[in-house]
Image (cartoon, coloured by chain):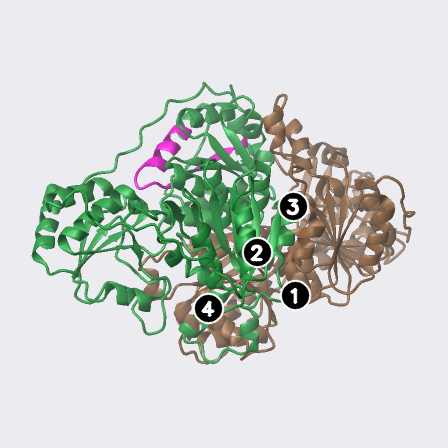
Chain colours: A brown, B green
């Protein structure tokens, strides 16, 4: 058994049985070992950012890591943007990066670079395997690191000779650390706070993995008992929402609106979150969103046991186990007329099937989605956690691998789509049930908005041209067909409704391109 | 005048008048300033790797840097693979990366990451502008650093508030350091060596910028006088070649063949090169290609004046100023019959116009190109310098911006094309005369070869599936049309010849997809 074989066997024994990959020469022994450990499913991507984003999407839906296999420093570079998003999503992920054989590294061959330094910029755990007999143990440690709360990116650097050399066999799985509950004194203090303050002056801010049903229900119990407000960070990892679940209001992306949401809050209780800040800084504006004079309390840090802590607090408050508000099943009417961002979102709300997984990178054109889907059948919502665009299509791909019995709907802005467009090919290759909706408005619309907000004076034609992607107008239906994904283009709302319905009813991936005007 | 305006004005005054960009919110003041300094040409890319690769291609053809504008750490991440290639190409390049405003950085907003650490992994010069009044001077220093021999990637990190704050105006251009000549004693020693050794036991290895006409002619004079052999590194930055120029043999990619080329060499004279090494390490094989017992001599280090040094050596040898061998104009016949990698390359050799710029990322399917084009009219050849695939299309884009009066031919393997495919959109937007030839064999063919070479035993079906990109088969003609580039697909040699001829005669970009079998 060589190093690569012992590595893959250890991953599988540790519960990691999918590897999203874009390998090169230095990873050939890993690839060859796939036939020796057929329990490991290799999923090929044509670009590394697809592989890393897919691993993120997979773990968001399964709460267990996938592995990724990348080729040297440049391959890792191509994967960084979505590893950044995974880090911000607190996703467990085992990122394996091949390197030159140790003897070869010192020769500074053309593909040599400092992989360790690159990996440290977004990994919480980085280790280079030094010998074939070590790699199995290193892999077990990598999985444990990835799974340690709140979940993190663990990067294992794998020199080629460590793969090809003789190993001793697989290593036993290593137990990750456990999420901890807050001290009883914390629960006591917060109970006194919630009992003693006036309604609506307390907000509970949920983040990370705290936007799922157990946390949402416990938070709803607390909110009902103490008239506190429940909010979520702007772009949570995964929200369980829809009919029968407590509705969740997210902090707005624009600081001005977030400020309104937090206005009057005198006590902010953090559940897995840092104090809220705006996405970007703007001239003359404070980036901190916590209102002046508001006291900040930590129920759980990111690595805490959010559900346990919220339930303990709800129980201490004597909150009843039910009776809190949940979303009613309420679907919007099917829209008609001119096609716009609004009618696209309305149609999605009207047609979304139960159990759908939404990978949301709709950006400006997707702002109506949250409202139109609030009363849809129960579903999951996956957000652009780290703000690095090009995440939606890969995350949709990984979510579909994770949940083959569910429909994945990827709401995708045209600009964002072009970073990781070859996700479509992987979806076709694997036969994944992904419906991609492209919001084609021919514009980096969010930047038109930001250009005003940052205070840039009177933008001229040269500046505006850099935000305009309408010449030539991208034809996503043609691009998708070129990657083996059936696709249609809609220019009216009726066409869009018919095409979306067809796509949702069809096995395998398909794409619907909605031609909408720029602006809101 | 704000910081961004002073920065762009300084770049233009320093000779940097093109900026390949994919900006975001933190770069909006830079974008807004484009209208204040219209001499700066902004070229939009839909993906950062296109921008960095295009800047590389531009500088290879002009010997002066372009600038790049990227958005924060993830944007830089997406640009890294081609910055790696640019570093290996020793390309002068000014890489500007926006960051959060300094006050905002400490808040750890979602898009925050350690840009400095990321940039250091492939930049020779990294600096963060700390104040708006400093940024003009920082920009002038960045350009000088980029231009200092042999040429390098200089990264300037630009916090948003440094862009928007008040500056004092532009800074004067800073002179880069000059390339140095070798000591007279070095010329003397090498002269004695070349006079005293037996023919064919000396090889001159050219690298970096030493593959252009002045260096090639001086090397040819030396070779003729002393019967030395002239070789180039495997993937030079830019080769001036074709009829009327000294032919140049490149070291083979495969170490076994390179070993044959160097067999019997007892003295190796390096011109801008390190001692040659194989691209990858293999079990039981030495990665160093210098033959046992061969003495290595340095005529010029990478930062040296290669032309001056070679001419001094030729003069010292008393080599006549002409009479050395040059390639004759000799075109292959137009091929016919079944379409294959061989007939594609033959057709390109037969039809390549004078002054063509070839961006070569044909990989395995392109191996016949060098032979078929050796006697073509004078042209430039741009190689995959750093081995990070996804370079060919962006480099072609930048070369076309640099040389609007010349035809760019991008020979592109299907696998490599998919990393930076949106280059086509930028080519369409800018109306660039680029002919892209896609070698569509449905395979990561080089990896099939490497899988054998690394000694992986009997690869099974799961391993082979990871190197097979034929299901679904990519349809590049459809993808290209989706990005606004006219495209055709050829399945016979006659079709390919007709389509290539049409593309070469057509203004603006177009793509010809050659459907060839996998293998050689």
Q: Which of pointers 1 and 2 indicates the residue nearer the eye?
A: 2
SS label for mark 1 = helix
From the top left corner, tell me how far across and down residue B243 is, in percent.
33, 48
Q: Which residue is mark 2?
A: B513
Disc 1 target residue: A429
Q: Report, in whole angstroms, how far the alpha carbon at label 4 lies from the one at label 1.
A: 25 Å
**Percent from the top left, x then y, of residue A219?**
78, 52
Q: Is residue B489 visible to the viewer in this orientation of the structure? A: yes
Q: In the rendered structure, does residue B153 fall within the stretch colored magenta?
A: yes
Indicate which disc residue B520 carries.
Answer: 4
Q: On the same chain: label 4 and label 2?
A: yes
Q: Which of these two is toward me, B75 or A28?
A: A28
Q: Is residue B3 above or below residue A347?
A: above
Q: Check the residue under mark 1 and report the chain it is in.
A: A
Q: Which residues are magenta?
A: B139-160
Say whether disc 4 or disc 2 marks the residue closer to the N-terminus: 2
- Determine the residue positioned at 46% across, 54% down: B348
Judge depth for marks 3 and 1 and give the one in front: 1
Q: Earlier in the sequence, mark 3 or mark 1?
A: 3
Image side of residue B200 versus residue A231, left or right: left
């Amino acid at each position: 058994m060589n190093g690569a074989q012992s590595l893959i066997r250890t991953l599988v024994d540790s519960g990691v049985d999918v590897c999203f990959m874009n390998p090169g020469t230095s990873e050939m022994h890993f690839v060859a070992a796939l036939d020796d450990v057929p329990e490991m499913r290799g999923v090929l991507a044509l670009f590394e950012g697809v592989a890393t984003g897919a691993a993120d999407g997979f773990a968001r839906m399964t709460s267990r890591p996938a592995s990724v296999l990348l080729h040297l420093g440049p391959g890792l570079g191509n994967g960084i943007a979505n590893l950044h998003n995974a880090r911000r999503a607190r996703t467990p992920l085992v990122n394996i990066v091949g390197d030159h054989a140790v003897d070869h590294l010192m020769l500074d061959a053309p593909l040599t670079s400092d992989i360790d330094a690159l990996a440290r910029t977004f990994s919480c755990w980085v280790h280079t395997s030094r010998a074939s007999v070590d790699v199995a143990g290193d892999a077990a440690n990598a999985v444990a690191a990835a799974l340690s709360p709140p979940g993190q990116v663990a990067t294992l650097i794998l020199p080629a000779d460590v793969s090809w050399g003789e190993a001793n066999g697989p290593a036993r799985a290593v137990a990750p650390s456990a999420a901890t509950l807050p001290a009883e004194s914390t629960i006591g203090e917060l109970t006194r706070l919630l009992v003693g303050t006036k309604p609506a002056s307390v907000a509970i801010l949920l983040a990370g993995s705290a936007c799922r049903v157990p946390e949402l229900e416990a938070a709803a119990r607390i909110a009902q008992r103490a008239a506190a407000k429940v909010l979520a960070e702007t772009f949570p990892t995964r929200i369980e929402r829809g009919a029968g679940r407590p509705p969740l209001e997210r902090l707005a992306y624009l600081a001005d609106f977030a400020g309104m949401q937090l206005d009057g809050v005198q006590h902010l209780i953090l559940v897995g979150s840092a104090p809220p800040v705006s996405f970007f800084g703007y001239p003359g504006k404070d980036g901190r969103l916590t209102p002046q004079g508001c006291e900040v309390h930590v129920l759980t840090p990111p690595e805490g046991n959010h559900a346990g802590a919220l339930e303990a607090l709800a129980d201490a408050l004597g909150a009843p186990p039910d009776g809190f508000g949940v979303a009613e099943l309420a679907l919007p009417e099917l829209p008609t007329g001119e096609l716009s961002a609004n009618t696209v979102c309305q149609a999605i709300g009207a047609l979304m099937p139960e159990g759908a997984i939404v990978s949301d990178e709709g950006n400006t054109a997707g702002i109506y989605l949250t409202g139109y889907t609030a009363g849809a059948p129960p579903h999951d919502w996956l957000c652009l956690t780290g703000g690095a665009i090009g995440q939606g299509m890969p995350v949709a791909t990984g979510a579909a691998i994770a949940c083959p019995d569910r429909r994945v709907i990827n709401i995708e802005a045209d600009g964002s789509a072009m970073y990781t467009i070859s996700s479509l090919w992987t979806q076709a290759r694997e036969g994944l049930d992904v419906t991609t909706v492209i919001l084609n408005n021919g514009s980096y619309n969010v930047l038109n908005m930001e250009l005003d907000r940052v205070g840039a004076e009177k933008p001229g034609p040269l500046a505006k041209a850099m935000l305009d992607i309408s010449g030539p107008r991208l034809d996503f239906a043609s691009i998708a067909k070129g990657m083996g994904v059936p696709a249609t283009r809609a220019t009216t709302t009726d066409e869009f409704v018919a095409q979306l319905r067809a796509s949702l009813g069809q096995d395998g991936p398909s794409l619907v391109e909605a031609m909408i005007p720029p602006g809101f």
